[in-house]
Amino acid sequence: MTWTELQAALKERNEAGRHVDFWWRDDDASAPSPALERAVGLSKKYGVPLALAVIPQDATPRLFEGLHERVTVLQHGTDHRNRAAAGEKKTEYPAAEPAGAALKRIETGMAKLRSVASQKFIPVLAPPWNRMRQDLLDKLPGIGIRGISAYGPQKSGEPAPGLRQVNTHVDVVAWRRGRRFVGEDEVLISTLHHLRSMEGPIGWLTHHAVHDAATWGFLERLFTLKDVRWRSAAEVFSYTAPAHG
């Protein structure tokens, strides 16, 4: 799979009147770092909106000082602590934890982000490890969470009344292969698959802290694609009207 083939597919879909929307979510932000500055810098250089999933408990006020106007802050759990029981996949929200305790923790994290991120924050939860208990979903709007973002296919755009879901679909990190770049061919094939199988915004998932040189190089190339509209988190979660483009 080549960039030329992907670009041709994008052009073909646009000419058919089916515009392609991408959006970008980057996880695990908590404090300024060279890697985070690089991600924010790429967003500014290419005019690509960045949805920064921030861990509230670890978030420092300095984190938000260097964010430009096209960066939106999402809530990445509260403490990103793995509470999974034996045999359970990693999660901040284990099955055995009382719902009230989990919701209280989410509410505490949201209050902090509202305080330190101010206008950049929108009430969207990106749960750590992209896992959220089903029984908590319908309770999230009651504490002020209006959106949720995980990874992979989703059954519904509204998994609970008042809760909008917009997932990410392409992860550029090979977590089980040394946390390196997953590979250009694999990513391009995955992208083409999503272009052909879905109509909603295709979400790109990154983790700035573990990017190698190949990952950064891929993102630079990705952001120069034509026939793509990069949407902000506020747009895909319907907090603002889509910008022209």
Image (tube, rainbow, N blue to C red):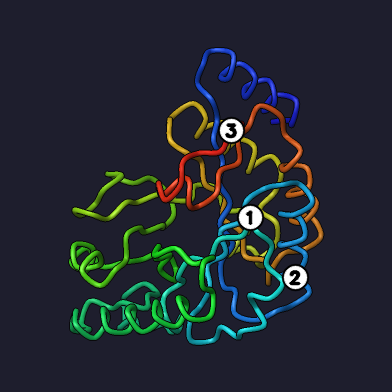
Amino acid type indicated by mark 2: Ala
Observer-side mark, 2 or 1, equals 1
Q: Quadrant of the C terminus?
A: top right
Q: Amino acid at mark 3?
A: His
Residue flagged by tag 1: what amino acid is it? Arg
Q: Is residue 105 above or below residue 24?
A: below
Residue lying at the far front in this picture: please name it.
119
Disc 3: which residue: 244
The one nearer the camera, 69 or 32, is: 69
Q: How much space separates mark 2 and mark 3, taking CA atoms?
A: 30 Å
Left or right: 95, with 148 as reference point: left
Left or right of residue 124, residue 61 in this image: right
Question: Which residue in the protein does label 2 denote?
Answer: 35
Q: CA distance from mark 3 to mark 1?
A: 15 Å
83 or 34: nearer the eye? 34
Q: Quadrant of the N terminus?
A: top right
Q: Quadrant of residue 163?
A: bottom left
Q: Residue at x 19, y 68 (%)?
A: 139
Which callout, 2 or 1, points at the residue further toward the start of the chain? 2
Percent of width and height locating residue 129: 44, 68
* Image disc number at residue 70: 1
Residue at image position (76%, 46%) is 46
Q: Earlier in the sequence, mark 3 or mark 1?
A: 1
Q: Residue furthest top?
A: 16
Callout 3: helix, strand or loop?
A: loop
Whether label 2 touches label 1, CB < 8 Å: no
Q: Residue 4: x, y in percent?
A: 75, 25
User: Which label's residue is closer to the chain start, 2 or 3?
Assistant: 2
Q: Residues within 10 Å of mark 2 (few under 14, many from 20)?
A: some
Residues 230 and 117: in front is 117
Under tag 2, what secondary structure?
helix
Res 66 → quadrant: bottom right
